Image (cartoon, helix red, strand yellow):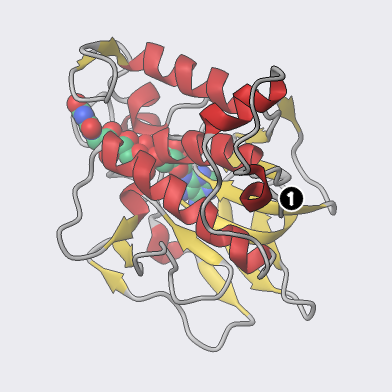
């Protein structure tokens, strides 16, 4: 994965948080041919899975009867890496500012980033990584989402507890800012890895229509794309994939 600290370059989607939701969102952003960047306050990828329970077995990730946390992070990274996302680690975002052209400037403790869409995924830095010891709580000693400053927008996020209320499209209510994973909430929400994958997929594909109103929400089937890339039969699905 490429790495950079700060850039004036305009990205299509910038994901705050490199946990399971953020890494899978990075894969999907690449699948939709978006220029994607991930920013995480931690020095490594994986969010809670990597930091809090990398050496434990997880039993409820679809397709893996059991998998070590660390191994799941490696697989998510390998999947995201196919589309070469730009990764900025050790950098905490504290302000999102709407620019006059509608894009968003993300200001961190190390620099600034420029993007069309922001996807929020983390509630804060996992407690184990924030100096609170290797406890079992995912979040604790950290500035959470409520500490994120919003500038240049008429209204802010609606919180339900520590997470942001989202629509079924994973919209936060602030145009161009989506949430998925533990950062997002709605009635019936479950804070689970499997759920975060689905939300990441929904967020990125709905963001596609924010970036390009002519784009389809449906991304096409990855299996169809592979068939096309290897010279197999065309199904006509590609027309829906173009942005
Ligand atoms: C001990 C434990 C065991 C668990 N076991 C399971 C299990 O068996 N199965 C299961 O499905 N779920 C399990 N979970 C829950 C699961 O880990 C979470 O639901 C999942 O990690 C959420 O993924 P996420 O990507 O939304 O957020 P996270 O994994 O929390 O990642 C968010 C990332 O965002 C970063 N971040 C936050 N704010 C900022 C900022 N302002 N700037 C930059 N970076 C920021 C954080 O540093 C973090 O790396 C467990 C949780 C814990 C704590």
In x, y percent, where is residue 216? 59, 59
Q: Quadrant of the N terminus?
A: top right
- In the displayed orientation, state which residue is furthest to the bottom: 154
Up the image or down, 216 lies above or below 109; here it is below
Q: Residue at x 44, y 27 (%)?
A: 46
Is the distance from the Cβ of mark 1 to the nearest ligand 1 atom less than 8 Å?
no
Q: Quadrant of the C terminus?
A: bottom right
Up the image or down, 167 lies above or below 21; here it is below
Left or right of 91? Residue 5 is right
Left or right of 86? Residue 162 is left
Up the image or down, 218 lies above or below 95; here it is above
Look at the image and tell me whether residue 109 can be seen: no
Q: Residues within 10 Å of mark 1 (few under 14, many from 20)?
A: some
Look at the image and tell me whether residue 214 can be seen: yes
In x, y percent, where is residue 86? 71, 35
Which corner quadrant of the image does residue 136 belong to?
top left
Q: Which residue is mark 1?
A: 111
In x, y percent, where is residue 214? 68, 67
Secondary structure beneath label 1: loop
Which corner quadrant of the image does residue 39 belong to?
top right
In x, y percent, where is residue 111? 74, 50
Which corner quadrant of the image does residue 175 belong to?
bottom right
* Total numbered labels placed on residues in the image: 1
Left or right of 242? Residue 15 is left
Q: Nearer the viewer, residue 221 or 33?
A: 221
Q: Nearer the viewer, residue 234 or 145?
A: 234
Quarter of the render that holds ligand 1: top left
Left or right of 35? Residue 175 is left
């Amino acid at each position: 994965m490429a790495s950079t600290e700060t850039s004036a370059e305009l990205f299509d989607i910038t994901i705050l948080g490199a946990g399971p939701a953020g890494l899978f969102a990075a894969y999907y952003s690449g699948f939709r041919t978006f220029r994607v960047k991930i920013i995480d306050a931690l020095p490594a990828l994986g969010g809670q899975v990597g930091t809090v329970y990398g050496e434990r077995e997880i039993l409820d990730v679809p397709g893996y009867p059991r998998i070590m946390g660390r191994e799941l992070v490696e697989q998510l990274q390998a999947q995201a890496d196919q589309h070469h996302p730009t990764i900025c680690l050790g950098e905490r975002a504290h302000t999102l500012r709407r620019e006059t052209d509608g894009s968003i400037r993300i200001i961190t403790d190390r620099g600034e980033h420029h993007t069309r869409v922001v996807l929020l995924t983390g509630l804060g830095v996992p407690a184990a990584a924030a100096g609170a010891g290797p406890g079992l709580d995912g979040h604790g000693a950290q500035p959470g989402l409520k500490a994120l400053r919003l500038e240049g927008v008429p209204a802010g996020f609606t919180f339900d507890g520590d997470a942001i209320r989202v629509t079924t499209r994973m919209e936060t209510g602030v145009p161009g800012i989506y949430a998925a994973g533990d950062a997002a909430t709605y009635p019936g929400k479950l804070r689970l890895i499997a759920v975060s994958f689905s939300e990441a997929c929904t967020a990125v594909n709905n963001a596609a229509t924010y970036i390009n109103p002519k784009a389809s929400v449906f991304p096409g089937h990855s299996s169809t794309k592979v068939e096309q890339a290897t010279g197999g039969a065309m199904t006509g699905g590609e027309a829906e994939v173009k942005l």
